[in-house]
Amino acid sequence: MKALQAQVNPHFLFNSLNVIVSLTRTEPDRARSLLIALSKFFRQNLNATRKTWITLEEELKHVKAYLLIEETRFVDRLHVYYDVDEAALTARIAPLTLQPLVENCMKHGIKDQDGEAIIRISVKAEEDGVRVSIEDNGTGIDPERLETLGTDYVDSHNGTGFGIYNVNRRLEHMHGKGSTLSIKSEHGAGTEITFLLPVERQEITR
């Protein structure tokens, strides 16, 4: 968990503060909202080491705080869509599970692409558990890198794949092998990452 906290990109903080400063005179209410979102984001990061489990609702609030700031930075070029079953939000999950996956979309999928950038987050209650999906329309992942992503550190010019590897290991440890990440990607056509929080484990951890 501490390793994931250390992965928080300092440029995200600096860029966020720059955006907030630029809005303080022209759009003070919006600047205040972003400052609150930034505070919530880092408070959740600090609280992550103190909890073993949180609800999906709490984890989703963390993601929304992060993406609210990113949407402002992208100036109407980033669009985020949520498809969430309210009944699924009571499911238990380890802190800092969704945010590293969403950040991976931003850093490696859509940050440098031209045109409209889209992220879709789905949380659906199913018969065997709660299925979570994060999808982007970014550049996609090279097939040779996709083979080991999530199972090992993957060296690249802009990262090691540590965040995804860490999330994958914790999902397996806390929810079982059936909850490990499923990654589908096509180079130039986006990426979809899904995982399942099984019913059995949800009942055990209540």
Image (cartoon, rainbow, N blue to C red):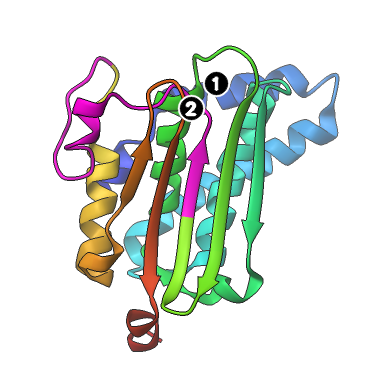
Residue 116: image location, x then y, percent: 65, 21
Q: Is residue 1 visible?
A: no
Q: Is residue 73 above or below residue 120?
A: above
Q: Which one is in front, 63 or 142? A: 142
Q: Residue at x 48, y 27 (%)?
A: 12
* 49 in the magenta segment: no
Q: Callout 2: few (<14), some (14-19), or many (20+) C-alpha neighbours within 10 Å?
A: some
**Figure label count:** 2
Q: Is residue 126 visible?
A: yes
Q: Are the residues at dot 1 and dot 2 in contact (C-beta closer than 8 Å)?
A: yes
Residue 119: image location, x then y, percent: 57, 37
Amino acid residing under circle 1: Asn
Mark 1 secondary-structure assignment: helix
Question: Looking at the figure, which quarter contains the C terminus?
Answer: bottom left
- For disc 2, the marked residue is 12
61 to the left or right of 47: right
Amino acid residing under circle 2: Phe
153 to the left or right of 62: left
* 149 in the magenta segment: yes
34 to the left or right of 153: right
- For disc 1, the marked residue is 15
For residue 86, the mark is none
Residue 140: image location, x then y, percent: 40, 26
Q: Which residues are magenta?
A: 133-157
